[in-house]
Image (cartoon, rainbow, N blue to C red):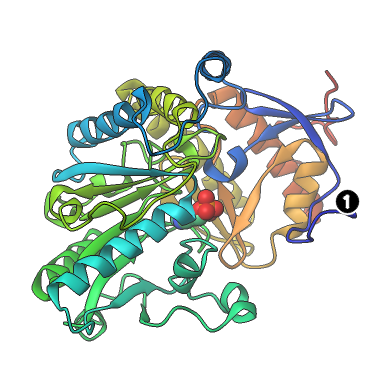
């Protein structure tokens, strides 16, 4: 593609169509999608009701700017607050800022934390932000500065000043890391890009306590792990109520593929933000908010959330079988719900390629981790079908002499 800035290495298939858990390339080959557009398409591709609402809203009002009210920004904000409270997560949530992406949601969170710090200490000394190794918070300069990965940061230095980095799940290190100079701490309850690493409740609780001690805001980045992916609306629901954050960021599944993000804050944080402090041209437009309103409603369904945990068990039993088969190659399984990581001892890229060639899309993360973030609507049959393909791909790559159960030679990609 000679006219595109080469920011990504893209393998051969060009996708032109999606339906449910499947994508179709331009030759109409079918691919089962265990990636969901990187934890985005939780309701699957081209959800029919979403498509209907999109067409309807596109014929009604797409954008009128944030200079005026529209029926949907407020409705989405209200629904996010109500469903968050109902879910038992972030009990003190009160207000929402709607934007267009995960990076922007974090950018708002970082700015709000800075504003809180500057109000608490007008000298400007309380401006430090703390994040953790292996985290991923985005590509804009603020969110990138919170992402201590040399691969992403080095070409674009210097970073925004005032960022400090700690070790994920290191409770002992928190006191020296988070100090009176800290205005905010940002952490993913489950690190996605960093390798599907799960924060312990002890770690989140200790961060919360230390933030209270020094007067810093605690930000949970649930852009990848939130919105029902762990079997409850927010991933931090698994930690005790005392570990709830002051700010929660979301995006990805919020639009099921349509760009939208949101920063949920307590009334206390909101009270520090005044007109003109922050803004966005597109954020909160009626089309995005109408869609997100529908999607949040669907993802709040307790039945869907329960099914996520059942599906996790199906994946885990298949992973256990793989580990028994390849004890020297597969080190461990991590994650919760339908954000799962299979830690390999070597490079998983050949497995990803072999799976894709056989009609299964899967992605990696961290160091040598295979990441499973399928649509939440995936069926048991689809999970098993995808796992059969993965097992076959591993058999080919690892040159196992064993016969792979459930497959009969190389599976052809079915044409539609
Ligand atoms: C945890 C987390 N935060 C932030 C982001 C950035 O979101 P976006 O790519 O929408 O800017 C991502 C994207 O992968 C993410 O996984």
Residue under the image location 11 percent in, 68 percent down: 212
Quarter of the figure with residue 188:
bottom left
Relative horizontal placement of residue 11, taking residue 210 as reference (left or right)? right
| Residue 262, position as x, y percentages in the image | 38, 44
Residue at the extreme left = 213
Q: Going by the image, does 81 lie left or right of 336?
A: left
Q: Which residue is mark 1?
A: 1
Tell me which residue sits at (69%, 32%) in the image: 32
In this view of the protein, which residue sits in the foreground, 262 or 256?
262
Examine the rendered structure and indicate whether residue 343 appears above or below residue 356.
Answer: below
**Within 10 Å of the Cα at label 1, are there few (<14), some (14-19), or many (20+) other Cα atoms?**
few
Expressed as whole percent of the image width and height from the top left, the position of residue 105 reads 41, 52
Residue located at (15% from left, 78% from top): 121
Percent coordinates x, y for residue 218 in the rendering: 23, 62
In this rendering, the answer to whether 95 lies above or below 116 is: above
- Which is nearer the eye, 27 or 411? 27
- List x then y, in percent, for residue 384: 61, 30
Q: In the image, is 130 to the left or to the right of 253?
A: left
Classify the position of the C terminus by image quarter: top right
Residue 341 shows in this picture: no
Q: Residue at x 57, y 51 (%)?
A: 371
Q: Nearer the viewer, residue 18 or 120?
A: 120
């Amino acid at each position: 593609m000679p006219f595109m800035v080469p920011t990504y290495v893209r393998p051969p298939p060009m996708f032109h169509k999606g339906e449910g858990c499947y994508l179709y390339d331009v030759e109409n080959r079918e691919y089962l999608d265990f990636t969901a557009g990187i934890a985005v398409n939780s309701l699957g591709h081209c959800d029919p009701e979403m498509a209907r609402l999109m067409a309807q809203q596109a014929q009604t009002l797409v954008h009128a700017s944030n200079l005026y009210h529209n029926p949907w920004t407020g409705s989405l904000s209200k629904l996010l607050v109500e469903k968050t409270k109902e879910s038992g997560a972030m009990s003190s949530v009160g207000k929402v800022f709607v934007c267009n992406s995960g990076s922007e949601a974090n950018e708002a969170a970082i700015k709000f934390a800075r504003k809180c710090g500057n109000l608490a200490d007008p000298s400007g000394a309380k401006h430090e932000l703390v994040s953790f190794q292996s985290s991923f918070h985005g590509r804009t300069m603020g969110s990138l500065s919170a992402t201590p990965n040399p691969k992403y940061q080095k070409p674009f230095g210097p970073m925004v000043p005032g960022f400090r980095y700690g070790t994920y799940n290191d409770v002992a290190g928190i006191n020296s890391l988070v100090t009176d100079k800290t205005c905010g701490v940002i952490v993913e309850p489950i690190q996605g890009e960093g390798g599907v690493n799960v924060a312990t409740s002890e770690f989140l609780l200790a961060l919360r306590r230390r933030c209270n001690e020094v007067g810093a805001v605690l930000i949970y980045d649930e852009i990848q792990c939130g919105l029902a992916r762990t079997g409850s609306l927010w991933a931090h629901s698994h930690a005790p109520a005392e570990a709830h954050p002051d700010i929660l960021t979301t995006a990805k599944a919020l639009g099921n593929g349509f760009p939208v993000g949101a920063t949920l804050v307590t009334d206390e944080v909101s009270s520090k933000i005044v007109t003109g402090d922050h803004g966005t041209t597109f954020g909160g437009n009626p089309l995005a908010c109408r869609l997100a309103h529908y999607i949040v409603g669907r993802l709040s369904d307790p039945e869907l959330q329960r099914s996520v945990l059942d599906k996790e068990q199906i994946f885990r039993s298949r992973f256990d079988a793989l580990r028994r088969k390849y004890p020297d190659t597969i080190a461990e399984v991590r994650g919760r719900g339908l954000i799962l990581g299979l830690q390999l001892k070597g490079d998983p890229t050949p497995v990803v390629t072999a799976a894709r060639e056989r009609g299964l899309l899967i992605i990696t993360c961290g160091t040598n981790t295979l990441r499973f973030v399928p649509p939440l609507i995936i069926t048991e049959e689809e999970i098993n079908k995808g796992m059969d393909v993965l097992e076959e791909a591993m058999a080919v790559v690892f040159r196992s002499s064993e016969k792979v159960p459930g497959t009969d030679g190389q599976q052809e990609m079915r044409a539609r």
